[in-house]
């Protein structure tokens, strides 16, 4: 009697698996038919319109301009494309301003490209007597490049 129950369960499981396989085949055939009957549209389909160089440039420029103005706290800013040598976006970009932190940032970049942070520097008389520094460096002080860069970037006379 036990053998018969297991046999019926096996037959029933095979029947369910067979029905699922058939259902999947039908779904696959329907998807293939839908795919074959649906036209494919590509981005460049449609009326072929020849654009002259000026029209193409206008399209490119409008695509690169931000659709929303950036929100900045600064009084001026600029986004400049070095490849095309064009200003992409600007805020008071033509107004003359003091170099401010730009000089400090460029100095830090040059130092990082040419020295090791662990190098020790001896402060020269000229450097010690240069105005504008609030680090209070003295002639012959020995300071690591790392500490000098921290002093450069963190200390500011402007408050």
Image: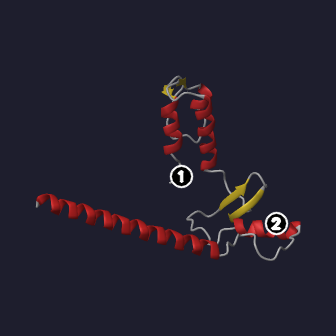
Which residue in the protein does label 2 denote?
Answer: 57
Work out whether 33 lies above or below 99: below
**Left or right, residue 111 beside residue 120:** right
Work out whether 18 lies above or below 99: below
SS class, disc 1: loop
**From mark 2 to mark 1, how far is it between C-alphas?**
43 Å
Q: Position of residue 43 (x, y in %)?
A: 71, 70
Choose between 135 and 76: the one closer to the eye: 76
Q: Visible in this render: residue 137?
A: no
Q: Residue at x 49, y 27 (%)?
A: 143
Q: Residue at x 86, y 70 (%)?
A: 51
Choose between 49 and 69: the one closer to the eye: 49
Q: Position of residue 101 (x, y in %)?
A: 59, 49
Q: Quadrant of the N terminus?
A: bottom left
Which residue in the protein does label 1 denote?
Answer: 158
Q: Residues within 10 Å of mark 2 (few under 14, many from 20)?
A: few
SS class, disc 2: helix
Q: Residue at x 32, y 67 (%)?
A: 16
Q: Residue at x 59, y 26 (%)?
A: 125
Q: Residues within 10 Å of mark 1 (few under 14, many from 20)?
A: few
* Callouts 2 and 1 close, C-beta under 8 Å: no
Work out whether 92 lies above or below 103: below
Front disc: 2 or 1: 2
Counting every numbered tag in the picture gives 2
Q: Visible in this render: residue 57?
A: yes
- Looking at the rendering, which quadrant does residue 70 occupy? bottom right
Q: In the image as oriented, which residue stretches furthest toward the right?
A: 52
Q: Position of residue 2 (x, y in %)?
A: 11, 59
Tag 1 or tag 2, which sits nearer the N-term? Answer: 2
Residue 84 circle label: none
């Amino acid at each position: 009697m036990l053998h018969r129950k297991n046999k019926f369960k096996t037959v029933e499981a095979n029947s369910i698996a067979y029905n699922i396989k058939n259902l999947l085949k039908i779904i696959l055939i329907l998807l293939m038919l839908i795919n074959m009957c649906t036209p494919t549209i590509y981005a460049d389909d449609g009326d072929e319109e020849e654009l002259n160089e000026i029209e193409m440039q206008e399209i490119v420029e409008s695509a690169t301009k931000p659709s929303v103005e950036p929100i900045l706290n600064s009084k001026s800013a600029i986004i400049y494309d070095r490849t095309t040598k064009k200003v992409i976006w600007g805020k008071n970009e033509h107004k003359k301003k003091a170099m401010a932190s730009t000089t400090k940032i460029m100095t830090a970049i040059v130092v990082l490209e040419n020295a090791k942070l662990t190098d020790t520097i001896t402060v020269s008389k000229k450097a010690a007597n240069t105005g504008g520094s609030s680090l209070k460096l003295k002639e012959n002080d020995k300071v690591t490049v790392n500490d000098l860069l921290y002093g450069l970037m963190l200390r500011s006379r402007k408050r």
